[in-house]
Amino acid sequence: MIRRAQPGDVAAMVGLVHDLAEYERAADECHLTTGQLHEALFGPAPALYAHVATADDVVVGCAIWFLNYSTWRGTHGIYLEDLYVTPSARGRGHGRALLVELAREAVASGYHRVEWSVLNWNQPAITFYDSLGARPQDEWTTYRLTDDALTALAKS
């Protein structure tokens, strides 16, 4: 079953995000807490959204997303920050169902795209995304400012 995340799902979702970070070989970079995620999803000005996949009333997957905006299209879109399904629940359609729900959300809201990033070495995910009709945007390179570089630029 796919549904919007509820406050009671936050702890499970934080666990899933940490599991994803471990899978992506970056566990030491993941510092998300339940308080942070709860505030982002359910605080006074939420700018983050999520859906969960459940099996027997247990959260087994999540899609965490936020709105972006295309100046070329003149509409918002959905940026999928994290999509993760526990290894024991994979192959049962939960990941596809989460993406179907995001596609429905986008279409119903008049958004023209759903975007996300995937690690170049994550072939199972790439094969899955290709099977849905998603296509890589190879002509773009993602840049990121973090930590000391971000602070240094802010001080300049």
Image (cartoon, grey):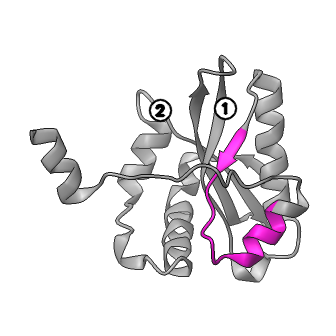
**Residue kind at label 2, given as amino acid type:** Pro
* Magenta-drawn stretch contains 12: no
**Residue kind at label 1, given as amino acid type:** Gly
Secondary structure of residue under mark 2: loop
Q: Residue at x 63, y 47 (%)?
A: 5
Does the image show residue 32? Answer: yes
Left or right of 100? Residue 151 is left
* Segment colored magenta: 114-129
Does the image show residue 1? Answer: no
Does residue 106 sit above or below 35 in this rendering? above
Question: What is the number of the mark on residue 46?
Answer: 2
Q: Which residue is mark 1?
A: 77
Instruction: Between residue 63 and residue 9, name the one nearer to us.
Output: 63
* Residue, far front: 139
Left or right of 89? Residue 119 is left
Does residue 143 sit above or below 76 in this rendering? below
Secondary structure of residue under mark 1: strand
Query: Residue 56 location, x and y as percent?
Result: 80, 68
Does residue 120 sit above or below 25 in this rendering? above
* Residue, far left: 155
Q: Residue at x 35, y 77 (%)?
A: 28
Q: Residue at x 43, y 52 (%)?
A: 143
Corner quadrant of residue 82: bottom right
Query: Residue 139 location, x and y as percent?
Result: 64, 50
Query: Residue 91 location, x and y as percent?
Result: 86, 76
Corner quadrant of residue 102: top right
Corner quadrant of residue 24: bottom right
